[in-house]
Amino acid sequence: MECTCLLLLLLSTLVYCSLGQGGVLFNPASLSVSPDRSQFFKLESVSLSCEVQGNSTGWRVVRNTERGILSECSTDWGKQQWSSCIVSLILSDSGVYWCEFGSGEHSNAVNITVHAGAVILESPALPVTGGDSVTLRCRYQGTRSDLTAIFYKDGSLIRAETTGEMTIPAVSKSDEGLYKCTNSEGESPESWMTVTDGGSTSSSSPPSSLLPSSLILPLSVSGLVAALAISLIILLVLFCKKRNKHVAAEPRDVTYADVRITQDPEPRRRREKSPGADPVYSAVKTSNTTVTLFIRTSWWVEKDALFSSGE
């Protein structure tokens, strides 16, 4: 009974931890970026929204800047609108952004770079689906649009494009990696492009090497708690099985009886037991330190009648 109660308590705790406000199970949230790119010039605006199936109440946009400052969307760096945050970007806004619920649930993380130079790479901030067509643009901050751009992946030259943009007709997992571009006006920062398979709807994050160390720990807390709770349940189940096996080995039905001892008035007289009066021994109950023997006895019957006081 005690083990059952403990199991129910642990299971209830797991369910409670996965509940949102109003007792509704958490729906996976995803952070959307508009426009969908990870590099911006100073003073450009970006809209970050927490997209949740169902009620998005309680979700908020959180960031961790390159300076290691963790904070929610507020008047200090953004304008909160329900579960969205609109940011007019400055250099100090570079960092990792994600959606978070009060209990620690979180969405995918997006790395946003605000560049002080003249050239940025317009590449998707969100994962792209395998088989889709993707266009990368080497954008110059000025008015010229006829600049030849050279594109790189993971530090290796891909090709040069006179139009300033490169199209991948059908992306695959092999196209995932770090991209950058250069033109006659300068070089862009690197941006990570994630490619998911056609059947996947979940968003993935940049490699942990690209995320600030202060962000990696919060993103892994919920998974660690869940794994710990599951481990505790498994250990408790094994303990209960062992305990129940030990209890089953002990006798459950024990017969108790009163035993009365009287002094024999004639020690030398022969006594006989009535038929069927053999002692009956009950089960023996053992423990670690004691052994208890319970005996059920029948009355001894004198062969002769009781002597009167005159004999």
Image (cartoon, rainbow, N blue to C red):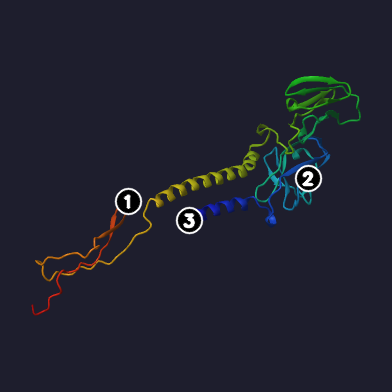
Q: In which quarter of the view is residue 150 placed?
A: top right
**Residue 135 to residue 289: above or below:** above
Q: Which residue shows up at 8% across the image and 80% down it? A: 310
Instruction: Find disc 2 in the rendering and name its residue.
Output: 49
Taking the view exactly as shown, the residue that stands out farthest to the bottom is: 310
Q: Which mark is residue 2?
A: 3
SS at mark 1 in the image: loop
Where residue 307 appears, as percent x and y from the top left, is 12, 75
**Closer to us: 40 or 220:** 220
C-alpha separation, residue under disc 1 versus residue under disc 3: 22 Å
Instruction: Find disc 1 in the rendering and name its residue.
Output: 288
SS at mark 3 in the image: helix
User: Which quarter of the figure is the C terminus placed in?
Assistant: bottom left
**Side of 105 relative to 292 (left or right):** right
Residue neighbourhood size for the residue with mark 1, other residues' Cα within 10 Å, grouped as few (<14), some (14–19), many (≥20): few
Q: Which residue shows up at 63% across the image and 37% down it? A: 213
C-alpha separation, residue under disc 1 versus residue under disc 2: 65 Å
Q: Are marks 1 and 2 in contact (CB under 8 Å)?
A: no
**Residue 101 to residue 267: above or below:** above
Q: Which mark is residue 118?
A: none
Q: Are marks 2 and 3 in contact (CB under 8 Å)?
A: no
The type of residue carrying mark 2 is Ser
The type of residue carrying mark 1 is Asn
Question: So how many labels did they put on this image?
Answer: 3
Where residue 153 appears, as percent x and y from the top left, is 75, 24
Q: Going from the N terminus, do you reach mark 1 or mark 3 first? A: 3
**Side of 142 relative to 112 (left or right):** right
SS at mark 2 in the image: strand
Q: Going from the N terminus, do you reach mark 1 or mark 2 first? A: 2
Q: Which residue shows up at 67% across the image and 46% down it? A: 105
Q: Going from the N terminus, do you reach mark 2 or mark 3 first? A: 3
